[in-house]
Image (cartoon, rainbow, N blue to C red):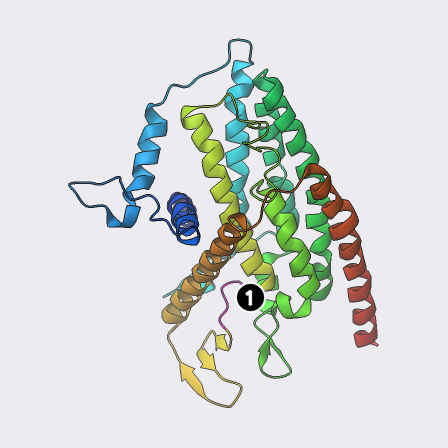
Amino acid sequence: MLETIILLAKIWAVLLTLVSLAGLMTWVERKESAIMQDRLGANRADILGFRVIGLFQVMADGLKMFFKEDFVPPTGHRLLHTLGPILAFFPALVTFAVIPFGSTLYLGSLVIPLQIAQLNIGILYLLVFGSFSFYGVVLAGWSSNNKYSMLGGLRAAAQLISYEVCLGTSLVGILMIYGTLQLNVIVDHQNQLLFGFLPAWGIFLQPLGFLLFLPAAMAETKRVPFDLPEGESEIIGYYTEYSGLKFGLFYFAEFMEILVVSALIATLFFGGYHLPWLYEEGFHFPWGGAWDLPNVVVAMIRLATFFVKIAFFAWLQVLIRWTLPRFRYDQMMRLCWKGILPLAVLNILVTGLILLLVNR
């Protein structure tokens, strides 16, 4: 009974945190673009005259979408039109179930791993459920019975399927080095030291894998410079016929995907929740110093470290979004099949050769 309560509490805490962060990302998107373009950004929404640097705009957007008309095209398929945004939003939520967001917390006799599900196929789980968003986008384009929506859905289908191949291939090097599919084990391996002082993060062991994973993961979020399925200045996109909360789910799902990608980058390449030289007992520095800390303090520091890393990579993705122009469709596909995929295969071969030499 107690284990069930703890599990439900972790699920509730993760869902509440994700929804809150995704809502905050809508503000970050506007403010960061405004700063880059020398503007003020969203700052008009207020409560009793207080604007709080535009944070109330998030609430205003939610209310606006809630009260907008839920329009379904007369010739569209009502059931599938409703199912599309749900299938686009749901995978972004469930992928966080296997991402470790902190170390083990000891409260008396209670042992609480700060991870919802410790699956031994964690990375496969992420790849499988991450690909489910493809169905939501395709259903949205087809069920609207609109040629522009259909064109956006076809673009999304080709883009997501292509870059899923690159995404999975770019992670094989990480799996070869750490020898496991469990994300919590991968994170623990990254707390070891290289050459006696350098943390064994994936970015140091697989730099090319990281450089290939980042654009492939960004392409899966369907945002600039990979926003061909939307292409608002060209075809409007797969959600042309959506309004109200259904459109809001598509909009919200994109920011959820940003957080998922940020969490994956932090987990696989930047040590996850680990801070260099911080262990279960406290800090142990390579030069010989030590600073013992209680387990609760260590767990809170690691939890904060993980969310700082997520915040940084979310900021980086928004920065890239407002820096680069949209690719042409042929450029996007060429980057996938003639750029990222061959380099990912080469990375696997080089990693295997190095591991073979090291083991010998």
Q: Residue at x 44, y 61 (%)?
A: 308
Query: Within 10 angstroms of label 1, few (less than 14), some, or many (20 or more) residues?
Result: many
Query: In this view, which residue lies farthest toward the front?
Result: 38
Q: Quadrant of residue 298?
A: bottom left
Q: Residue at x 36, y 22 (%)?
A: 68
Exactly how many numbered labels are in the figure? 1
Query: In this view, which residue lies farthest toward the top?
Result: 74
Q: Can you give x and y, in whole percent of width and height, for residue 177 in the image?
A: 71, 66
Q: Quadrant of the C terminus?
A: bottom right
Q: Residue at x 70, y 34 (%)?
A: 158
Q: Quadrant of residue 344?
A: bottom right
> Is residue 204 within the magenta segment?
no
Query: In this view, which residue lies farthest toward the bottom?
Result: 288
Whether residue 294 sits left or right of residue 230 in the image: it is: left
Identify which residue, 268 or 294, lies in the foreground: 268
Q: Which residues are magenta?
A: 270-275
- Identify the residue under disc 1: 271
Whether residue 142 sits left or right of residue 61 in the image: it is: right
Q: SS for tag 1?
A: loop
**Residue 96 vertical placement versus 59 (above, below):** below
Amino acid of disc 1: Gly
Whether residue 152 sits left or right of residue 358 in the image: it is: left
> Is residue 273 within the magenta segment?
yes
